[in-house]
Amino acid sequence: MPNTVKSRRPTLDDVAARAGVSAKTVARVANGESGVGDATRERVSLIIREMNFRINHSARALAASRTYSIAIVTGWVPAYYITQMFEAAERISTRHGFQLVLRQIDLVEPGALDSFAAALRRQPVDGALVTAPLCDDLALLDLLENEGIRYVRHSPLHEPERSDAVYSEEAHGARLVIDHLLELGHRRFGLLTGPSGHFSSAVRTESALERLAVAGIAPAEVPVVQISTNSGGFKASFEATAQIMQTEPRPTALFCFNDLVAAGAVAYLQSIGLSAPRDVAVAGFGNADFGLLTTPQITTVRQPNAEMAVAAMEWLTSSPAAAPRLLTLPVDLIARASTNGRIGIDFGPGDSVT
C-alpha cells in the first residue's frame, strides 16, 4: 500500500537540532542577518539547503506583530528613477528578511487616499519610502502616521524635519550643467522645468537661474516652460520644447528637468530639422540608461537614486533613531554629445568611440 502521508515541512527547530545551534541562529542565517560567525553561517547555510528549509514569513510576522513588508510609495511608477530605487531597495530588503511592495497613488483621482488606506489595511506594511513629490502631501503623511507606519521621504520640499529624509545635491548638479554650457560659449538659455511643488524641480530651476545671473544673464532673459512629467511623458516634452523654441531670440541651450524631458526635446528638434548640439545643446538630469540610446547621447547629472534607496531601506529595516535623520549624497556631471559634438559614443567607464 503506497505511503500517502505528506512529508512535514522542516521547521527552525529541525534545522537547529541538526546544526547543533539555536533556532535564533538559524533564523539569522536564513534572513541574512549579522551576529553569526563565518564557520557557523556556512554550516547552517549548507543544512538549510540540504533540508530545503524556507522561512515562514506569515508565522514570523504573526509572532512578532510585524508584517516584514515595506512599501515604495510613488505617484508615477514608470519614472526611471523609481526603477533605480526599487532595484536597490529590493536588494536591501531581501538581505534583512523583508518583502518589498510597490504602491502608486494618483492624488488627482477622487478618493485616491481612501483607496490607499484600504489597501494598507488589506496588506499592512511596517514602513514606507515615499518618493517626490508625494513626500510633500501632508494628508498622505498624516495617514501613514495615523496607521503607525514609519516612513522615509525622498527629497521633501516641506517640513524636512518631520521624518527621516534622503536628498541629493540638486543645486550643485544644476550649477554643474549651467557651468558646462557656459564654458561651451552659450549665452541664450531655456529651462524646461518639472511640476510645481516638486523639490527637485524647484531647486534645479532656482539654482540654474542663480548661476546664470552670476554670469550676467538675467532671469528675465531666460524663458522657462513648466512640464508635468507625471502626465504626458514624451508628448508633453514635445509640446514644451515647441513652446520654448518659439521665443525670441531662440535659445541655443536647453536645461531639462530630467532625462525623459531631454530625450523628448532632442526628438522634437530633430522633427523640425534641427539637431543637438549643432543648433541647440540639450542637457538633462538623472542619468537614465536610455540617455545612452538616444542620438545624440544625453548630457546629464548622475543622481544617486540607488544609494538614496539603500540608506532609506537600512533605516526602515532597523530600529528608529531618536531624532529624524537627513542625508544628502553627491552628484556628478556626465558630459555627452547632446551638448558637445566632440564627445564620442559612451558605452561606459573607459569605453568610448570618437
Image (tube, rainbow, N blue to C red):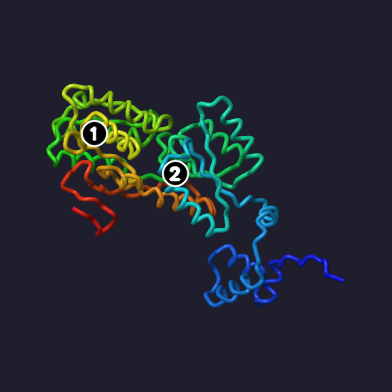
In this view, the residue in front, 210 or 228, is 228
> How far from the left and from the top, in percent, is residue 2?
84, 70
- 286 with respect to 61 (left or right): left
> How far from the left and from the top, in percent, is residue 105?
53, 34
Question: Please, what is the three-letter code of the amino acid marked with disc 2?
Answer: Ile
> How far from the left and from the top, in percent, is residue 32?
55, 64
- The N terminus - image quarter: bottom right
Depicted 49 relative to depicted 262: above or below: below
Instruction: Pick whichever of labels 1 and 2 is earlier in the sequence.
Output: 2
Query: Which residue is denoted by mark 2 in the rendering?
Result: 82
- 15 with respect to 151 (left or right): right
Tell how many labels.
2
Res 217 → quadrant: top left
Query: Which residue is denoted by mark 1 in the rendering?
Result: 254
State the residue at coordinates (31%, 49%).
330
Q: Secondary structure at mark 2?
A: helix
- 259 with respect to 17 (left or right): left
Question: Badge 1 local density, few (<14 within 10 Å), some, or many (20+)?
Answer: many
Quote the CA–CA distance across marks 1 and 2: 24 Å
State the residue at coordinates (67%, 68%).
23
Question: Badge 2 local density, few (<14 within 10 Å), some, or many (20+)?
Answer: many
State the residue at coordinates (59%, 35%).
116
Q: Secondary structure at mark 1?
A: strand
> How far from the left and from the top, in percent, is residue 295?
26, 42
State the residue at coordinates (57%, 31%).
113
Name the mark on residue 32.
none
